[in-house]
Amino acid sequence: MSLDVLIVDDSAAIRKILQRVLVQADVSLGKVYEANDGREALEKLKGSPVGLILSDINMPNMDGLELLANLRADQAFQQVPIIMVTTEGSQNKVLQALQLGANGYVRKPFTAEQIKEKLAGLV
């Protein structure tokens, strides 16, 4: 069964790399949606439910933590796996993401193997 995915990052290059890494990690991809920040992500999700969300933490307009809090407060997204993909060096932000309900995190730069490990048991 293919999986619809939303990739949220303010870098178009990172969004493309993540999409490639998902393919390398043997994820059977359906539709892949992209968003530049949390606000755009919420808009995309209104009409397009997904089975996985990969999100950066540091973004303009609405960061990944605010997006995560919004998603976990919405009944429709409480069971959707959300993996944070970040350059954030601060353990505080990573812990905050986990407390808000992230299913895991991967630090940039990442490998296909790291993404595959995080997705094990989630998708």
Image (tube, rainbow, N blue to C red):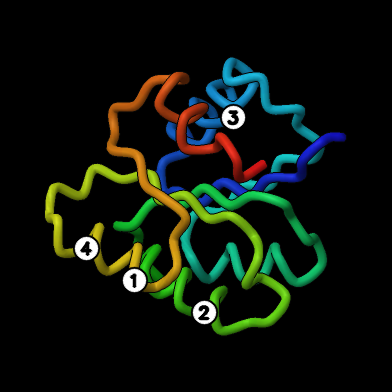
Residue 23, position as x, y percentages in the image: 64, 20
Q: CA distance from mark 2 to mark 4?
A: 16 Å
Q: Residues within 10 Å of mark 1 (few under 14, many from 20)?
A: few
Q: Residues within 10 Å of mark 2 (few under 14, many from 20)?
A: some
In which quadrant of the rendered view does residue 47 lie?
bottom right
Q: CA distance from mark 3 to mark 2?
A: 24 Å
> Label 3, on which residue?
19
> Label 4, on which residue?
93
In the image, which is nearer the foreground, mark 1 or mark 4?
A: 1
Of mark 2 and mark 4, the one earlier in the sequence is 2
Q: Is residue 23 above or below residue 81?
A: above
In which quadrant of the rendered view does residue 80 lie?
bottom right
Residue kind at label 4, given as amino acid type: Lys
Q: Which mark is residue 99?
A: 1
Of mark 3 and mark 2, the one earlier in the sequence is 3
Q: CA distance from mark 3 to mark 4?
A: 24 Å
62 left or right, relative to 26 = left
In which quadrant of the rendered view does residue 60 lie?
bottom left
Q: Residues within 10 Å of mark 4 (few under 14, many from 20)?
A: some
> Label 2, on which residue?
70
Identity of the residue drawn at 56% across and 34% down: 120
Identity of the residue drawn at 59% across and 15% down: 24
Residue 15, position as x, y percentages in the image: 51, 36
Residue kind at label 3, given as amino acid type: Gln
In the image, which is nearer the foreground, mark 2 or mark 1?
A: 1
